[in-house]
Image (tube, rainbow, N blue to C red):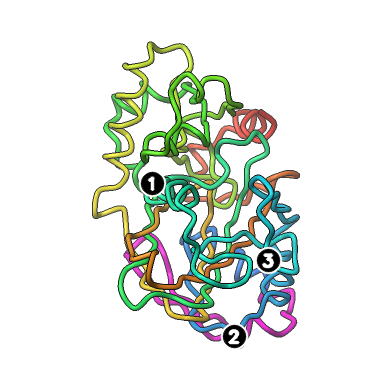
């Protein structure tokens, strides 16, 4: 059995069938799955039949999983600490009427990269749909390798050595969550290069997000204007696509070469049960060099990136 791959766009995203993710996989099949992630950045596995335990088991193939910590005293509705609540449900399974939680979720509608606000970043996110609304609730993805390649050389030269500080609270503020800039400044941040080497392909990729608070060494407004310009460029239609969910779909995306955002839906009246596992970036995955891009690769810069 081999993977059957249907490209979603010419260079980014693929729908993959021909594999049963609920069953043990051969080393050759595991290698093909990892290779597809390096090629396409986002892989959609329709109607997988995964339950929570199988979701976690499959996710461990990619590395160590992030353990979810609760927000405040909120209890998880899951039996496993590696599942992140990405829907709109209470621990008892009812639709959440918590306005604070709703306001916080609005930040997920902005283009972002999971965990860019932490020093120990995450590589892959694996989001499984259990229940989806009839309308809306899509997830949109952006190709940060393709966007980097298409940048004018002048911009590439300008941003080559720049770094950004990322803050979870800053993206919530941008989305309208009631937090002040002064409060954001008192919260933890993480610093990462604006351009890095993608481990799965050896290609250069932008690493930006709505979490990006500032450009290190720039005046605040100048830095934010640059971030806004790069976000607008990288999310043009030629670099993006949207996935309309069906129950059972598993979508895996690589946080080192993509951004994503959630689509609007009626989260007051319609259920959305989405569960995510997230793969830690440390220890870093091996660099698998794509010979097509070998002239762009500087190993010393990659080592600095993964150990920042």
Q: In the image, which is nearer the foreground, mark 1 or mark 3?
A: 1
Query: What's the residue at 36%, 72% (across, down)?
Result: 244
Q: In the image, which is nearer the foreground, mark 2 or mark 3?
A: 2
Instruction: State if disc 3 and disc 1 touch (CB < 8 Å).
Output: no
Callout 3 crowding tier (Cα within 10 Å): few <14, some 14–19, many ≥20: many
The percent position of residue 15, horizontal first and vertical second, equals 44, 75
Tell me which secondary structure the magenta stretch mostly adopts.
loop
The numbered disc on residue 59 is: 3
- Residue that badge 2 annotates: 49
- Is residue 20 within the magenta segment? yes
Tag 3's secondary structure?
Answer: helix
- Which portion, as a residue range, is magenta? 1-29
Q: Where, quadrant-wise, is the C terminus in this rendering?
A: top right
- Image quarter of residue 38: bottom right
- Residue that badge 1 annotates: 111
Indicate which disc, 2 or 3, sits on the residue closer to the N terminus: 2
Q: Left or right: where does residue 238 sit relative to residue 110?
A: left
Query: What's the residue at 69%, 68% (across, down)?
Result: 78
Of residue 99 and residue 134, the one placed in the foreground of this image is 99
Q: Left or right: where does residue 264 sit relative to residue 53?
A: left
Q: Where, quadrant-wise, is the N terminus in this rendering?
A: bottom right
């Amino acid at each position: 059995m081999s993977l059957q791959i249907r490209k979603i766009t010419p260079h980014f995203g693929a729908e993959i069938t021909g594999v049963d993710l609920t069953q043990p996989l051969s080393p050759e099949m595991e290698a093909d799955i990892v290779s597809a992630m390096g090629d396409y950045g986002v892989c959609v596995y329709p109607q997988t039949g995964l339950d929570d335990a199988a979701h976690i088991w499959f996710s461990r193939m990619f590395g160590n999983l992030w353990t979810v910590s609760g927000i405040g005293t909120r209890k998880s509705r899951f039996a496993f600490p590696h599942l992140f609540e990405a829907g709109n449900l209470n621990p008892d399974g009812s639709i959440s009427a918590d306005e604070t939680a709703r306001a916080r979720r609005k930040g997920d509608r902005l283009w972002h990269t999971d965990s860019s606000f932490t020093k120990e970043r995450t590589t892959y996110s694996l989001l499984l749909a259990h229940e989806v609304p009839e309308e809306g609730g899509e997830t949109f993805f952006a190709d940060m390798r393709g966007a980097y390649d298409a940048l004018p050389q002048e911009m590439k030269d300008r941003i080559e050595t720049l770094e950004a500080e990322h803050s979870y609270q800053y993206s919530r503020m941008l989305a309208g969550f009631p937090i002040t800039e002064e409060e954001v400044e008192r919260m933890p941040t993480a610093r990462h290069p604006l351009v890095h080497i993608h481990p799965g392909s050896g290609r250069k990729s932008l690493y930006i997000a709505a979490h990006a608070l500032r450009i290190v060494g720039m005046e605040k407004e100048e830095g934010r204007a640059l971030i806004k310009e790069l976000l607008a460029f990288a999310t043009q239609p030629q670099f993006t696509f949207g996935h309309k969910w069906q129950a059972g779909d598993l979508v895996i995306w690589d946080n080192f070469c993509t951004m994503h955002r959630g689509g609007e839906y009626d989260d007051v009246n319609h259920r959305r049960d989405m569960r995510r596992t997230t793969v830690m970036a440390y220890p870093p995955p091996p660099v698998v060099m794509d010979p097509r891009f070998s002239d762009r690769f500087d190993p010393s810069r990659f080592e600095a990136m993964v150990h920042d």
